[in-house]
Image: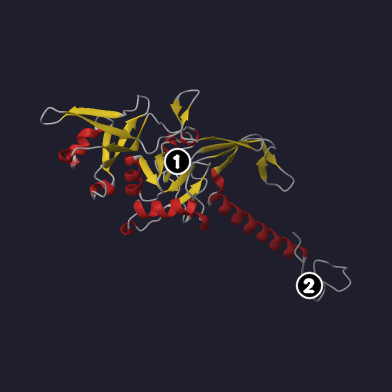
Amino acid sequence: MAILTDGDSEGENPSGGDGGGGSASTGTKEGDLLRVSLMDSEAREVQGGTSNIVKAGTQGENEGGRTGATVGSPISIKDGASKTNSPWLKNSQAGPSVPVIEVVGGVASMQIPEDIFDESELLWKSFVVGYFIGDAPHIGSVHATVNRIWSTPKDGSKIDVQFIEKNTVLFRIDNSQMRTRVLQRKYWHIANVPLVVNVWSPESALNPPDLTSMPLWVDLCGVPNDLYSHKGLKCLTRAVGRFVKLHPNTERCIRLDVARVLTEVNLHEPLVEKITFKDKEGVEREIGVNFPWLPPRCTTLREYSSET
């Protein structure tokens, strides 16, 4: 780097004129001091973090006098390479594990620590997938219904709804307790359409729901008065499947000729059409069994399907 001092106006003595007081030796000393200062500054930068980047391969002096890596040589980024005082790292949530990375020809090869694979806080953990058995209701009706029956004011979180297929819906439930409660019950009725829910994952989204058994409304016709009770109806329902709950109209005795019960029915077994028993006097009694709705059945495989 050239250091210019005051010289004569005609340029005969570029290092200094007769009245400028400059000299060639003075400019050389100032240039040496400046070069030393620049070298010290570069050394401090290397000690501040750039020394953690190790360049493997043949190194030599380039035209500027600085050392560098041969073109195409691998670059290994070791632990601690990102320990510079960067403002972007202040809000980083990265864990203590740092992968080992080697870059060759623009391709980064890295070793991911096992604890990163075992991370439990996956970003898609809040999602629940649901399959409507039949024609799905409008998304507005689904959104309003699930936020009314699944969430509570104290939860303070709303449920997001989006359709990913015609009868497949994705629910985002951030509250873990609410999500667990929804999954434990598994079967729901949204706008009078059965819904089967399951944990969402990239794999489960591609698999149809298991319809081996599912809760269905069962109408028991002609129930004797002495059996029209919670215990009596639960006992009769065992002939059809597993008792879940009574319909609200049945609990309020709006109709006494028909008792409607939500029952988990095994769809791979023949459906019960009648129930017979003997009353306290030994008289043979008969109760009719009707299903107001059944899922569509595949005539080829003779199995129930989630699609219409």
Q: Residue at x 32, y 41 (%)?
A: 185
Q: Which mark is residue 286?
A: none
Q: Is residue 215 above or below residue 278?
A: below
Residue count near mark 2 (Cα–Cα under 10 Å), binned few <14, some 14–19, many ≥20 = some
Compute the Cα span from label 1 to label 2: 89 Å
Q: Is residue 271 left or right of residue 204?
A: left
Residue 302's image quarter?
top left
User: What residue would you read off at disc 2?
Assistant: 6
Q: Nearer the viewer, residue 296 or 18?
A: 296
Q: Residue at x 43, y 41 (%)?
A: 130
Farthest-out residue, left: 281
Q: Amino acid at mark 1?
A: Phe
Farthest-out residue, bottom: 19
Q: Is residue 180 left or right of residue 140?
A: left
Q: Is residue 100 in view?
A: yes
Q: Which mark is residue 132?
A: 1
Front position among marks 1 and 2: 1
Mark 1 and mark 2 residues within 8 Å of each other at the beta carbon? no
Q: Position of residue 274 (x, y in %)?
A: 28, 29
Q: Is residue 96 in view?
A: no
Give the SS element for disc 2: loop
The figure's colour scheme reads: secondary structure
Q: Amino acid at mark 2?
A: Asp
Q: Is residue 1 above or below residue 278?
A: below
Dot 1 or dot 2, earlier in sequence: 2
